[in-house]
Image (cartoon, rainbow, N blue to C red):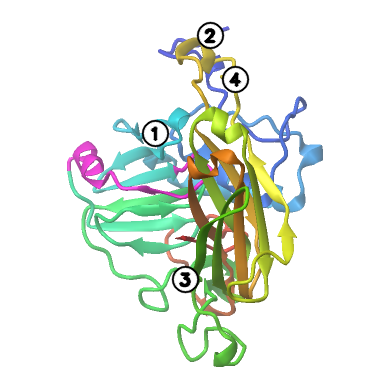
């Protein structure tokens, strides 16, 4: 049965959860939370959530309830008369989002559908859609931060962000002025958590001696040369000790026949300028070569593959050498875009305040911390 809507409800089968009875997916804790935030802030009143309660962990149920509570409190501000989809095409891997204007403010939820980091930078178009230029970009998920005005937003692959846009400037609400933070209910009030790479105050920062601290991701290129049978790139890296889920992310671009002929290898070493001493398993991210059942009706066939993506889990703190080998006759005809990505874990110290950063329920803090990346 179809509803009396311009688009039938059976076409809304997007951003579903991975616990349906017919379940082809696995899901990690951060993607579960990202999907919950995106699902409940798109503005639609049709919420497609095929969940089997028997599959839910306590953490999944808890964070889902928190997101639902947040949505109930802010329901009048979502799916407003001016709500619309903005940004690029998800099918083409471009950052897209949903904009919900209300009063002198608006909610903006963004998602990067691509596996590699990229920038959302269409600020002028956003101001045109709103009819006014926001004077405050207050991000509330995956962590709280007042973003620089009219500057691009760097997003990790598949990352989701929720931002409150304000017509007028707002006061800084961080207990450490200018610092991003996460907030959660705690005994005695609300606990504010801060990035853990570098010292922010006398009380908040790394617990090791200054000589052992690595305050940011640091990369020194040490080689980019042809080798027998391919091409090699090497870096000497400083990986902060609280970088979670650190990866060397590689996008190789070229013609499909060249991509199919290559072997991509990664490795690490203790020493600057020394090639691989420890091989790192490669996770290759394959493109789906078929359109979905619904999108196949409205979108053209998928063309030749123009890129391959690889991820290598790199050492989780300290200094190391990293090696990337692209092997095959086509190694000189392809290009490689390389990133170090991960999440800056929160500092061990926190500040407890009597009041939350905003009225109403809070969204859950991100399980890993603060998104970070560096193109190398």
- Residue contact between numbered discs 4 and 2, judged by CB atoms under 8 Å: no
Of labels 4 and 2, the one closer to you: 4
Q: Which numbered disc flags the more N-terminal residue, 1 or 2?
A: 2
x and y, in percent, of residue 299 in the image: 46, 16
Q: Nearer the viewer, mark 3 or mark 2?
A: 2
Q: Is residue 13 left or right of residue 315?
A: left
State the separation of the CA atoms marked 3 and 2. 46 Å
**Residue 131 horizontal side relative to residue 193, left or right:** left
Residues at badges 1 and 2 in contact (C-beta under 8 Å)? no
Mark 1 lies on residue: 79
Q: Quadrant where the N terminus lies?
A: top right
Crowding at label 2, few (<14), some or many (≥20) Cα neighbours within 10 Å? few
Gap between marks 1 and 4, in whole Å? 32 Å
The extreme right residue here reads 54
Q: How many other residues sit within 10 Å of disc 4, few (<14), some (14-19) or many (≥20)?
A: few
Precedes in sequence: disc 4 or disc 2: 2
Magenta residues?
111-131
Q: Helix or strand or loop: what does disc 3 sit on?
A: loop
Does the magenta-highlighted stretch encompass residue 294?
Answer: no
| Residue carrying label 2 | 2
Is 118 magenta? The answer is yes
Of pointers 4 and 3, the one earlier in the residue sequence: 4
Q: Residue furthest front?
A: 228
Query: Residue at horizontal 60%, vertical 27%?
Result: 288
Which residue does the numbered mark 3 point to in the structure image? Answer: 355
Which residue: 37% across, 45% down?
A: 108
Looking at the image, which residue is at 46% across and 87% down? Answer: 201
Residue at 57% from the left image edge and 42% from the top image edge? 309
How far separated are the C-alphas under marks 4 and 3?
50 Å
């Amino acid at each position: 049965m179809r509803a009396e809507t311009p688009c039938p409800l059976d076409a809304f089968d997007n951003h579903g959860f991975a616990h349906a009875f017919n379940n082809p997916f696995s899901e990690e804790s951060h993607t579960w939370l990202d999907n919950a935030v995106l699902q409940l802030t798109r503005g639609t009143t049709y919420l497609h959530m095929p969940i089997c309660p028997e599959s839910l962990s306590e953490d999944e149920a808890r964070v889902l309830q928190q997101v639902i509570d947040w949505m109930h409190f802010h329901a009048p501000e979502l799916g407003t008369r001016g709500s619309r989809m903005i940004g690029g095409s998800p099918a083409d891997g471009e950052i897209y989002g949903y904009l919900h204007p209300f009063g002198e403010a608006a909610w903006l939820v963004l998602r990067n559908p691509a596996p590699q980091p990229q920038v959302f930078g269409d600020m002028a178009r956003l101001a045109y859609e709103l009819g006014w230029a926001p004077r405050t970009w207050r991000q509330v998920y995956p962590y709280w931060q007042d973003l620089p005005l009219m500057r691009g937003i760097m997003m990790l692959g598949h990352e989701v962000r929720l931002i409150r846009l304000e017509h007028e400037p707002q006061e800084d609400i961080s207990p450490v002025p200018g610092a991003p933070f996460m907030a959660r209910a705690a005994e005695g009030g609300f606990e504010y958590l801060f990035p853990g790479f570098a010292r922010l105050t006398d009380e908040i920062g790394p617990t090791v001696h200054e000589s052992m601290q690595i305050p940011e991701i640091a990369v020194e290129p040490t080689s980019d040369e042809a080798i027998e049978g391919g091409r090699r790139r090497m870096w000497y890296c400083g990986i902060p000790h609280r970088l979670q889920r650190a990866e060397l992310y590689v996008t190789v671009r070229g013609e499909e026949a060249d991509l199919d002929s290559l072997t991509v290898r990664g490795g690490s070493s203790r020493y600057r300028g020394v090639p691989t001493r420890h091989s790192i398993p490669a996770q290759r991210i394959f493109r789906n070569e078929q359109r979905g059942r619904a999108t196949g009706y409205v979108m053209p066939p998928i063309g030749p593959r123009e890129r391959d993506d690889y991820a290598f889990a790199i050492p989780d703190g300290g200094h190391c050498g990293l090696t990337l080998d692209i092997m095959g006759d086509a190694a000189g005809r392809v290009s490689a875009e390389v990133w170090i990505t991960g999440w800056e874990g929160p500092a061990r110290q926190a500040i407890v305040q009597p009041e939350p950063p905003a009225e109403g329920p809070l969204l859950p803090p991100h399980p890993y911390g603060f998104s970070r990346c560096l193109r190398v």
